[in-house]
Amino acid sequence: MAQTRAQRAAQDRRHLPGDQVQKRGASMPRPPPRKTHHPSPPGQPTSVHGRCRKRANEDTHDPAPRPPPNRLRAAVGDTFTAGDNRDPNYPIEFWVREGSWPHDYIQPDMEHALARQRSSNSLRRKRSDSATSTTPSDQRAREEKSAPYRDPRYETLLNTKGTYMETSELGVADESKLICRNLLQGEQSIPPGSIFDSTVFERACNNLQKANEARVIQDISRLLVPSAETLALYTKRLKLLKESVNEGWNNSIPLTGTRPQPDYSVGFRREAFTEGQLTKLSPFIGDFIRGDLSFFMATYYMYFPFLACEVKCGAAALDIADRQNAHSMTLAARGVVELFRLVKREDEVHRQILAWSVSHDHRSVRIYGYYAVIDGKDTKYYRHPVRTFDFTELNGKEKWAAYRFTRNVYDTWMPDHFKRMCSAIDQLPLKLDFDVSALSESTSLSQGLENHHLTPSEADSASLLADDDDQSAHAAQIATPPTSFSKPAPAKRRKSPVKRP
């Protein structure tokens, strides 16, 4: 008769010294015994008692305790322990099956930073609205988008969220004060041939005295806050920047029920980061095309915003612009804080300016920097006044001050800021690095558009994104937000050609 595995193991142990048997048993766990079927000779029935005697003999030859049978992979909700010997592809298989990352595979101190999926009701409503509306949902009218900020109580609402339109008790760090001074004093070349030329400056200002916001933006906004992408056409080091104009920050985890929609904002484009960095960021960004919410994104194409500009008419209206900027730049600073908190380096950004804003009308400019005061897990955000001035006074002596400041932010402050952020991204743990880049790219960009019946132009208008109130309500409902992507379609098998004999 053929020997059973237990019998062969017993014979092997008889030929080994005692200490080697112990050592071998400790270092090499035996697989569970497999049942061996021995067919009976023809005409001879198999006896039940014979099988029992045979099992007893095997137990006699193998006195060691029998290991438990191999465990199946844990189902949803099973706890992942250090002793589990799971397939390294387990998270991806789980995602393909369930549409989210396994809860037990996520580090508890990182759960709060994971991307948050938008509710399906919001997506359906947005697609319905986009079919009947000629105005993209992320480009509301200026009067409509600024309505909540007209109420002075909005500042109190920001206070309840940990945002204060004032300086903190200790103020900004000395290093940031020096940066502000250098940004104001740094020289920059001035663009020729504009309405800021001394020969026409006074008449141009007179023309704008009763102009509306659209006219002010058209005539002077880019002379106060120059376009990052336009400058990037001539300066290679600025090509990593991405700007948005009057677009809602639909991909940002909301702070209040109002969605930020700056007149102008600047952040980083996706191509600014390496593939390895994007892979590490993927769990925290989610399906950005579908509209998942993230601490690290403003729009679906802008990462880590750091500059916002709001334009108004009249001195009193600048207070409204300041509230809008305070809201937007709190989200910008929050993204950097959350990134450094993930790698336990939040002390590096404590009381450091992490974002900037410019509020202006046809004659006045207000420049602010935004910073975080971090006390353990508690974080509060404050505003540092950089400069407030009337650029029409003294025959326009300081008319280029805001332009030089903004250019210095692009040329001097931004590269150091970006380098510091990349160093933090590089330190994100590899445990969350399970080939999500391919999933996010192929699934989000292609199927994300197909599954939602959108053309690329419709996706650009962000018509599938939820309303402000839906963002806040949905984000508040998620205690442990999952990172989710659109489920990939099953791969089609290629038919192999039939071989003819």
Image (spheres, rainbow, N blue to C red):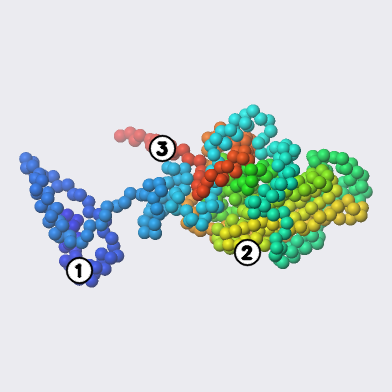
Query: What's the mark number on residue 235?
Result: none
Instruction: Quickly name the residue at label 2.
Output: 348
| Residue appearing at x 25%, y 64% in the figure | 25
**Quarter the C terminus occupies:** top left
Instruction: Quickly name the residue at label 1.
Output: 16
Q: Is residue 350 above or below residue 257?
A: below
Q: Is residue 74 left or right of residue 248?
A: left
Q: Closer to the camera, 8 or 406? A: 406
| Residue appearing at x 77%, y 63% in the figure | 182
Whether residue 9 is visible: yes
Counting from the top left corner in percent of width and height, residue 336 is at: 62, 56
- Under mark 2, the amino acid is Glu
Numbered disc in front, either 3 or 1: 1
Q: Secondary structure at mark 2?
A: helix
Say few, some or many: other residues with alpha carbon within 10 Å of mark 1 (under 14 / 14 to 19 / 20 or more): few
Whether residue 220 is visible: no
Numbered disc in front, either 2 or 1: 2
- Under mark 1, the amino acid is Leu
Cα distance, mark 3 to mark 1? 51 Å
Q: Is residue 348 left or right of residue 43?
A: right
- Under mark 3, the amino acid is Arg
Counting from the top left corner in percent of width and height, residue 29 is at: 28, 60
Count of marks placed on residues: 3
Q: Is residue 482 left or right of residue 322?
A: left
Query: What's the mark number on residue 493?
Result: 3
Numbered disc in front, either 2 or 3: 2
Q: Closer to the camera, 339 or 271? A: 339
Say few, some or many: other residues with alpha carbon within 10 Å of mark 3 (under 14 / 14 to 19 / 20 or more): few
